[in-house]
Amino acid sequence: KWLLRGVALTLLSKGASADGDPASFLKFSTDFDAKCVVRGGVMIYISNTHSTGKIRVLLERWYMDNRTADRGRSVLMPGAVPEALGCSLVSKGKQEWRVIKSEWVK
């Protein structure tokens, strides 16, 4: 009885990684946010679109087409509210984030 439960839990925990590349379940989106709108931009968000798997993501920030030293690390839960990254424009310069690495969290 306990052995079957252990096998079932192991299969369930490995199930998320069987769904392929976690990066394919990451979604960037934008929405209006007062502090960004006054700068002429929008807020940039990232979310996990997978139905059950948690994704650990490492992001790098780019400003005016130049990579910065800033890095962001998050664990994105399935079905969670998108995580705000920052405004698309800062001091009249374009700001964006790129995925360096993503992996399933067991």
Image (tube, rainbow, N blue to C red):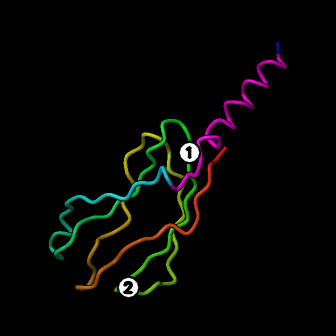
Vertical relation: 76 (above or below) 34: above
Q: Quadrant of residue 2?
A: top right
> Residue shown at 27%/85% (left/top)?
93
Q: Position of residue 84 (x, y in %)?
A: 36, 60
As drawn, the label of residue 65 is 2
> Residue shown at 53%/36% (left/top)?
52
Please tell me how crowded label 2 is: few (under 14), some (14-19), or many (20+) other residues with Cα within 10 Å: few
Please tell me how crowded label 1 is: few (under 14), some (14-19), or many (20+) other residues with Cα within 10 Å: many
Q: Position of residue 103 (x, y in %)?
A: 62, 55
Vertical relation: 42 (above or below) 14: below
- Mark 2 and mark 1: span between their CA atoms? 30 Å
Q: Secondary structure at mark 1?
A: strand
Quarter of the image for the N terminus: give it: top right
- Image marks 2 and 1: residues in contact by CB distance under 8 Å: no
Disc 2 or 1, which lies upstream in sequence?
A: 1
> What is the magenta segment's predominant secondary structure?
helix
The residue tagged 1 is 54
Instruction: Judge from the rendering whether residue 33 lies leftward or rightward of residue 76; answer left or right.
Output: left
Q: Quadrant of residue 29?
A: bottom left
As drawn, the label of residue 63 is none
Q: Secondary structure at mark 2?
A: loop
> Residue shown at 29%/71% (left/top)?
87
Of 64 and 24, which appears nearest the observer? Answer: 24
Q: Please provide the residue range marked out in magenta.
A: 2-23
Vertical relation: 70 (above or below) 53: below
Q: Residue flagged by tag 1: what amino acid is it? A: Lys
